[in-house]
Image (cartoon, coloured by chain):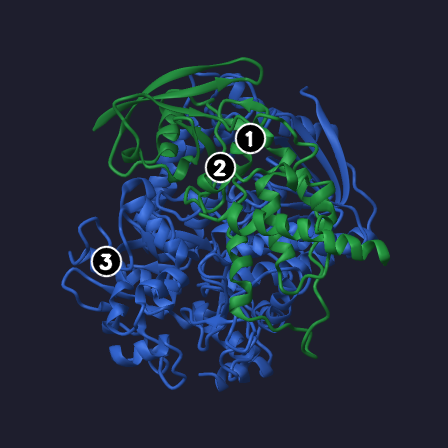
Chain colours: A blue, B green
C-alpha cells in the first residue's frame, strides 16, 4: 500500500474560503488544536470572487432596517422553504460579524459620517450590503486569512480530501493527498467541519473556479450524511457571454445596484414587463422611480432589475428564446447611460465598479463607461447542501459539521445576493464553536487500516488504468454539457430523465478513466478524482429536481410552471441507501413559531 | 481557427526544458485558455496553478515572453502570435513542476509582520468612524491579490536571493496597509528597518510595472515607509533628541 503521513487535530476544517477560515479562527480561539485544509493556496478560495457585498442590517444608511426586515427578505427570496431558524440566526448575527471584520482590519467603504457604507442589492428592501467597491470577497478573505495566520491554526495548502473516515456513524478523520508532490495524508480528527463551497463545475457555463466540484457535498453523502434542497441551483443573471473563453465570469449585481439597466435588442427595458405579484408592492413601475431608488431616495421603490436572481435569470432566458438577444447571445446591461443623469459618471463608475471596468476592458475590449455590456445567466451557487442543525451546524453524522455554501437551509429556494458572505461568517463561527465543543467532549475515534486501503486504492486507480483508458477531461466536459442542457434554468421531467441515463453512463466511464506519469501536481489525476464528486452532486441535483414537481426559486419546471402550496411545506432530502443507490425523500418543514410568522406578516 | 505555438517550460524539479505545443486559438483567448487546451488534448500531466480565471485570485502567475504576468489576463491578441509564445514559471521561486513554483516562502513572511491592532472603538457600540479620504490609500494596497509577481520581478529577491533579509514588495505593501490604517496602533518601523530590509529596495519600480492590480507599490507604499523609517532612525534632530531622552 502507498505510504502516508498522519496528522491529528481536535478539529479539522476542510475548505479555506470565508466559512472555513472563520470556523478555524473560532475553534482555535476555543483552545483546541485546529488543522485547516486548503484545496488551493491560502487566500485563493472562491470567496475571493464575491463582488457586491456582505448583507447585514446595520441600518447605517437607512435606519428603518433591522434583523426582522432582513429575515423577512431572506424568507421571501427563498420562497419560504428556508430553514427559518437559520434565516433568523443569520439576520440577527450578521451585523456583529461585519463589525468583527472591521475590528480585524477590514476596510469597508464609508458613509459621509464615517460609518460602514451599505448599498442596494436584489431582494433587499433597504441598502444593506457593506462593501469595498466591487471586491468585497477579497477584503473578507484577506481579513480572515491575515487573522488566521496569527491564530495558531495549522494550514495545509494545496491539499485535497478524497474521503472522510467514519466509525459507527461518527466521523473520525479524513484522507487525502497534497497536490505538490502527490503524497497521501491522513488527518485524524475528533470533529470535522466541511466548508468546501459549491458545485458550479458541474455545469458548462459557471462563475465558479475549478475548485467548485462539490467535494463537501459528496464527501458528506458518501459518509452517510443527508443532503437537502439540491434541486435549488442559482443561475446568476449576469455572467459575461463574450469572448467565448470568459463565458460565465461574473458581472456583479452591484452594476444594477448602481443604476445599471437591462435591455433587449429592441432597446426595451424588459424587466418592467414581468414583476411577480409578491414583489409588486416593493417594485418601481417606471424608470424614473427606479433611478431615484438607486440614488438613495428612501421614498422610491427598487427597479425591477433588482428583483431576485432566479426571476431576472428567467426573464433574460425568455428574451433570448424569443430572439431578442444581443449579437453574442446575451442581453445588454448598461451602466454607461447614467452619464445622462450624473456629472462625472465615468469616474463614478470606475470608483464604484473598478473590477468590472478592468474585467471588460481587459478581457472583452469593452469600456463600460461608454458602452453596454453583454450578459447572460451563469451557474453561480447551490442553495442545497449538507443538512445541518440550525444552531450547531452539525450534520446528520456525529462530529461532522458543515458551513457556508456546502451546507443547506438558510437560502431556501433562492439566495439573495450578499447573503452568502454573511452566511459564511455567521455559520462559520457557529460551526467552529460547536465543533470545538464536540471535540472537547469526545475522545478521538479510530481510523481503520482497511478504510485507508480502500481510499488509497480508489485514489490510485486512474494510474493503474494508464493512458489507454478514458480521458478524465472528456468525461468532465460531457457531464458539464449534459447538466447545462438538461438540468439548467428551465427543466422538464423528460429531459432530466434523459440526463439520469447519461449520468449512469458517465459513472461507468468514470470508473475507467486513466492517467499516466507521476503524482506530482498532476491535473489529469486531480480531474479524475474530482469527477467522482461532480457525478454525485449532479445526480443529487437531477433526482431532487425530478422529485419537486413544481416551480420555486431557482428551480423552474416547464412542465409544472406554477408554485404549489403543498410543496411549500417540504424539502427534498437525498441520502445513500444501503445498496449504494441514491434515495430521495420528502421531509416536512417544521412549523414556524408565531413570532417569526408575525415578522413575515408585518413586512409583507 | 488559427494555430499557434506555445513554448512551455517542462520540469519535474531539477532540470527542465522548453517544449513546443501547437494548438488552435480563437478570438478572445487568453494564455491560460491555451494552456488548458494543451492540457486537455496533448499533455494531461502539464502542471499549472490556477483558480478563478478572472484576475481576482492571483494563482496563475507566470512569465510570458519573459514578462511576469497573470496567464488568465493575458490576451493572445496582445502578443506577437507569429512567434512561439514562451510560458515559464515564476523564476524567483524554486521550481516544483512545469509552470508551478514553490511560493511557500511568501506565506512564511506574513506572520512575521505584527498583526493589526486597532485603537479603542470610537463609539459606545464598539464601532469606529473613519473618513473615506483617510482610507483611500489603504484600500489601494488592499486590492493586492497576492499573485507574487512583484516578488518574482524584484531583483533583491530574484538576483540577490536575499529572502532572509528582505520581505519584498508584496509584504512592504502589506506593512504599509497596516501602518497607514487609521485605526492601527502597532509599530512596525523598527522591524521594517532591521528585520524586513526596507533599505534594500532601491526604487527601480519593477514591482509597480508588473502589478496586475495597478497598485503604486513603490510610490505609495514603499517610499512613504522609507521616509517614516528615515525620519525615525536617521533624522539628526530626532537622533539628538533621543540621546537626551
Picture coordinates of residue B80, whole percent (x, y): 28, 27
| Badges 3 and 2, same chain | no
The chain to which mark 3 is attached is: A
Q: Which residue is mark 2?
A: B206
Picture coordinates of residue A407, whole percent (x, y): 57, 55
User: Mark 3–mark 1 contact, CB under 8 Å?
Assistant: no
Give the CA distance from mark 3 to mark 1.
41 Å
> Can residue A363 be seen by looking at this rendering?
yes
Q: Decide which of tag 2 and tag 1 comes sooner along the chain.
A: 1
Q: Give B228 or B211, whichever is nearer the viewer.
A: B228
Q: Which residue is mark 1?
A: B155
Residue at x-position 61% and y-position 26% = B160
Q: Which residue is mark 3?
A: A371
Q: Quadrant of residue B105?
A: top right
Give the CA distance from mark 3 to mark 2.
34 Å
| Label 3: which secondary element | loop
Residue at x-position 73% and y-position 55% = B237
Mark toward the viewer: 3 or 1: 1
Q: Give A313 or B144, whichever is nearer the viewer.
A: B144
Quarter holding the N terminus of chain B is top left
Q: Is residue A84 left or right of residue B76?
A: right
Residue at x-position 32% and y-position 74% = A303
Q: Is residue A291 left or right of residue A326?
A: right
Quarter holding the C terminus of chain B is bottom right
Q: For the residue carrying disc 2, how many other residues have a C-alpha within 10 Å: few (<14), some (14-19), or many (20+)?
A: some
Residue at x-position 37% and y-position 55% = A356
User: Mark 2–mark 1 contact, CB under 8 Å?
Assistant: yes
Q: For the residue carrying disc 3, how many other residues have a C-alpha within 10 Å: few (<14), some (14-19), or many (20+)?
A: some
| Badges 3 and 1, same chain | no
| Badges 2 and 1, same chain | yes
Amino acid at each position: 500500500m502507498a505510504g502516508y503521513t498522519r496528522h491529528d487535530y481536535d478539529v479539522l476544517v476542510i475548505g479555506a474560503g470565508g466559512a472555513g477560515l472563520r470556523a478555524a479562527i473560532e475553534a482555535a480561539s476555543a483552545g483546541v488544536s485546529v488543522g485547516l485544509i486548503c484545496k488551493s493556496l491560502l487566500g485563493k478560495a472562491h470567496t475571493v470572487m464575491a463582488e457586491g457585498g456582505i448583507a447585514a442590517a446595520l441600518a447605517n444608511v437607512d435606519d428603518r432596517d433591522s434583523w426582522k426586515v432582513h429575515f423577512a427578505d431572506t424568507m421571501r427570496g427563498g420562497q419560504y422553504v428556508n430553514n427559518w431558524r437559520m434565516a433568523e440566526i443569520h439576520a440577527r448575527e450578521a451585523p456583529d460579524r461585519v463589525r468583527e471584520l472591521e475590528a480585524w482590519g477590514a476596510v469597508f467603504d464609508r458613509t459621509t459620517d464615517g460609518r460602514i457604507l451599505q448599498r442596494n442589492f436584489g431582494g433587499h428592501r433597504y441598502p444593506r450590503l457593506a462593501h469595498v467597491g466591487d471586491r468585497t470577497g477579497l477584503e473578507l478573505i484577506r481579513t480572515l486569512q491575515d487573522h488566521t495566520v496569527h491564530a495558531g491554526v495549522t494550514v495545509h495548502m494545496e491539499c485535497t480530501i478524497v474521503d472522510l473516515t467514519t466509525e459507527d456513524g461518527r466521523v473520525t478523520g479524513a484522507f487525502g493527498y497534497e497536490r505538490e508532490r502527490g503524497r497521501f495524508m491522513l488527518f485524524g480528527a475528533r470533529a470535522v467541519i466541511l466548508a468546501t463551497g459549491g458545485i458550479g463545475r458541474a455545469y458548462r457555463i459557471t462563475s465558479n473556479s475549478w475548485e467548485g466540484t462539490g467535494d463537501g457535498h459528496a464527501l458528506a453523502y458518501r459518509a452517510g450524511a443527508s443532503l437537502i434542497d439540491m434541486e435549488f441551483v442559482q443561475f446568476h443573471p449576469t455572467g459575461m457571454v463574450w469572448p467565448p473563453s470568459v463565458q460565465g465570469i461574473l458581472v456583479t449585481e452591484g452594476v444594477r445596484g448602481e443604476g445599471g439597466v437591462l435591455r433587449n435588442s429592441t432597446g426595451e427595458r424588459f424587466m418592467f414587463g414581468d414583476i411577480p405579484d409578491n414583489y409588486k408592492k416593493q417594485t418601481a413601475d417606471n424608470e424614473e422611480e427606479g433611478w431615484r431608488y438607486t440614488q438613495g431616495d428612501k421614498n422610491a421603490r427598487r427597479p425591477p432589475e433588482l428583483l431576485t436572481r432566479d426571476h431576472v435569470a428567467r426573464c433574460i432566458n425568455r428574451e433570448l428564446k424569443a430572439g431578442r438577444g444581443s449579437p453574442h447571445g446575451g442581453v445588454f446591461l448598461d451602466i454607461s447611460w447614467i452619464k445622462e443623469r450624473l456629472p462625472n459618471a465615468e469616474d463614478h463608475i470606475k470608483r464604484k465598479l473598478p473590477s468590472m471596468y478592468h474585467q471588460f476592458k481587459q478581457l472583452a475590449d469593452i469600456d463600460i463607461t461608454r458602452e453596454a455590456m453583454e450578459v447572460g445567466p451563469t451557474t453561480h451557487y447551490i442553495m442545497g447542501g449538507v443538512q445541518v442543525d440550525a444552531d450547531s451546524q452539525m450534520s446528520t453524522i456525529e462530529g461532522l459539521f458543515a458551513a457556508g455554501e456546502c451546507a443547506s437551509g438558510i437560502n431556501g429556494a433562492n439566495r439573495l445576493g450578499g447573503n452568502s458572505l454573511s452566511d459564511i461568517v455567521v455559520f462559520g463561527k457557529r460551526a467552529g464553536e460547536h465543533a470545538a465543543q464536540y471535540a472537547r467532549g469526545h475522545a478521538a475515534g479510530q481510523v481503520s487500516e482497511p478504510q485507508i486501503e480502500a481510499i488509497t486504492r480508489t485514489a490510485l486507480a486512474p494510474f493503474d488504468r494508464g493512458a489507454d483508458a478514458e480521458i478524465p477531461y472528456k468525461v468532465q466536459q460531457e457531464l458539464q454539457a449534459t447538466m447545462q442542457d438538461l438540468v439548467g434554468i428551465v427543466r422538464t421531467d423528460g429531459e432530466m430523465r434523459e440526463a439520469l441515463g447519461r449520468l449512469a453512463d458517465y459513472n461507468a466511464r468514470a470508473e475507467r478513466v486513466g492517467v499516466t506519469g507521476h503524482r506530482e501536481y498532476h491535473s489529469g489525476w486531480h480531474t479524475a478524482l474530482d469527477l467522482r464528486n461532480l457525478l454525485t452532486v449532479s445526480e443529487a441535483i437531477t433526482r431532487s429536481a425530478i422529485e419537486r414537481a413544481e416551480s420555486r426559486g431557482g428551480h423552474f419546471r416547464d412542465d409544472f410552471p406554477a408554485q404549489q402550496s403543498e410543496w411549500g411545506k417540504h424539502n427534498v432530502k437525498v441520502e445513500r441507501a444501503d445498496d449504494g443507490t441514491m434515495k430521495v425523500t420528502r421531509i416536512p418543514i417544521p412549523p414556524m413559531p408565531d413570532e417569526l410568522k408575525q415578522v413575515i406578516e408585518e413586512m409583507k | 481557427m488559427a494555430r499557434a505555438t506555445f513554448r512551455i517550460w517542462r520540469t519535474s524539479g531539477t532540470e527542465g526544458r522548453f517544449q513546443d505545443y501547437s494548438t488552435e486559438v480563437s478570438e478572445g483567448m487568453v494564455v491560460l485558455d491555451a494552456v488548458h487546451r494543451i492540457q486537455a488534448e496533448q499533455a494531461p500531466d502539464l502542471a499549472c496553478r490556477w483558480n478563478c480565471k478572472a484576475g481576482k485570485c492571483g494563482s496563475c502567475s507566470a512569465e510570458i515572453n519573459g514578462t511576469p504576468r497573470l496567464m488568465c489576463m493575458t490576451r493572445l491578441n496582445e502578443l506577437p502570435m507569429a512567434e512561439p509564445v514562451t510560458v515559464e514559471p515564476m523564476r524567483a521561486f524554486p521550481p516544483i513542476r512545469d509552470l508551478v513554483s514553490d511560493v511557500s516562502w511568501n506565506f512564511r513572511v506574513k506572520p512575521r509582520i505584527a498583526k493589526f491592532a486597532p485603537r479603542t472603538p470610537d463609539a459606545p457600540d464598539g464601532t469606529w468612524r473613519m473618513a473615506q479620504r483617510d482610507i483611500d490609500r489603504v484600500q489601494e494596497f488592499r486590492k493586492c491579490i497576492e499573485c507574487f509577481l512583484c516578488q518574482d520581478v524584484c531583483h533583491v529577491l530574484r538576483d540577490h536571493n536575499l529572502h532572509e533579509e528582505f520581505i519584498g514588495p508584496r509584504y512592504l505593501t502589506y506593512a504599509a496597509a497596516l501602518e497607514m490604517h487609521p485605526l492601527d496602533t502597532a509599530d512596525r518601523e523598527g522591524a521594517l528597518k532591521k528585520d524586513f530590509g526596507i533599505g534594500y529596495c532601491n526604487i527601480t519600480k519593477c514591482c509597480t510595472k508588473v502589478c496586475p492590480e495597478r497598485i503604486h507599490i513603490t510610490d505609495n507604499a514603499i517610499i512613504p515607509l522609507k521616509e517614516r523609517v528615515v525620519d525615525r532612525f536617521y533624522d539628526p534632530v530626532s537622533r539628538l533628541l533621543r540621546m537626551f531622552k
